[in-house]
Amino acid sequence: MQLDLDTYVPGLLLWLSNRVSSSASSLYNEKFGIGVTEWRILSYFKIYPWSTASKACELMGLDKGAVSRSIAFMVENGWLEPRPQGLRKIEYHVTPPGNKLHNAVFRLAMAREEALLEGFSAAERAQVITLLKRMLGNLEGVQRVGR
């Protein structure tokens, strides 16, 4: 028995995700001085202002240590503003300079998405999104396999 890497969906998804993420990180670092983790976190706080790092980790499935380091970097650079809410809870929101950075990266991210989906019809794009969301919905079952 062996995997068929041309048809093994988890492998194809991982390959695609790693390649897109790696090239984004290199490009964003070159153009804006941030990596893909900072971009994800900046986008998260743009969508969910005054939320917490813990909630960001939960939603995006990111490592808490990486998120903590990225948030500290973004606070230090004035892109995020912290607001303590008790002893251990801190909420963050995107500052005006952070909004400027977000908007610049956003334009590039949308151009990259367009390049990734080149040749896809509107119906195919909608179908890809539907199928990916279905897979996300199946993750609980995947995590139960073998337990």
Image (cartoon, rainbow, N blue to C red):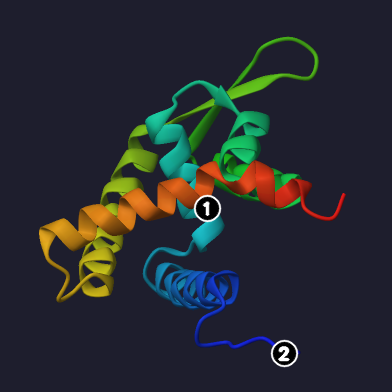
Q: Quadrant of the N terminus?
A: bottom right
**Alpha-carbon neighbours of circle 1 within 10 Å: few (<14), some, or many (≥20)?**
many
Q: Position of residue 9 (x, y in %)?
A: 53, 71
Spatial separation of the CA atoms under disc 1 and disc 2: 37 Å
Q: Secondary structure at mark 1?
A: helix
* Residue 54 shows up from this direction: yes
Could you tell me the amino acid type at mark 2?
Gln
Q: Are marks 1 and 2 in contact (CB under 8 Å)?
A: no
Relative height, residue 108 to residue 46 (above, below): below
Q: Is residue 122 left or right of residue 61?
A: left
Residue beneath the point at 22% across and 52% down = 126
Q: Find disc 1 in the rendering and name its residue.
A: 38
Could you tell me the amino acid type at mark 1?
Glu
Q: Position of residue 22 (x, y in %)?
A: 51, 75
Mark nearer the viewer, 1 or 2: 2
How many discs mark residues in the rendered view?
A: 2
Q: Secondary structure at mark 2?
A: loop
Q: Is residue 129 left or right of residue 7?
A: left
Q: Find disc 2 in the rendering and name its residue.
A: 2
Residue beneath the point at 36% across and 70% down = 31
* Residue 63 shows up from this direction: no
**Alpha-carbon neighbours of circle 2 within 10 Å: few (<14), some, or many (≥20)?**
few
Reading the chain from its start, which is encountered first: label 1 or label 2? 2
Q: Which mark is residue 21?
A: none
Which residue sits furthest top?
Answer: 86
Q: Which image quadrant for residue 30?
A: bottom left
User: Which residue is nearer to you in this view: 11 or 78?
Assistant: 11
User: Which residue is nearer to you in this view: 113 or 71?
Assistant: 113
Relative height, residue 107 to residue 71 (above, below): below
Q: Position of residue 83 (x, y in %)?
A: 59, 18
Residue beneath the point at 59% across and 76% down = 11
Residue beneath the point at 79% across and 19% down = 88
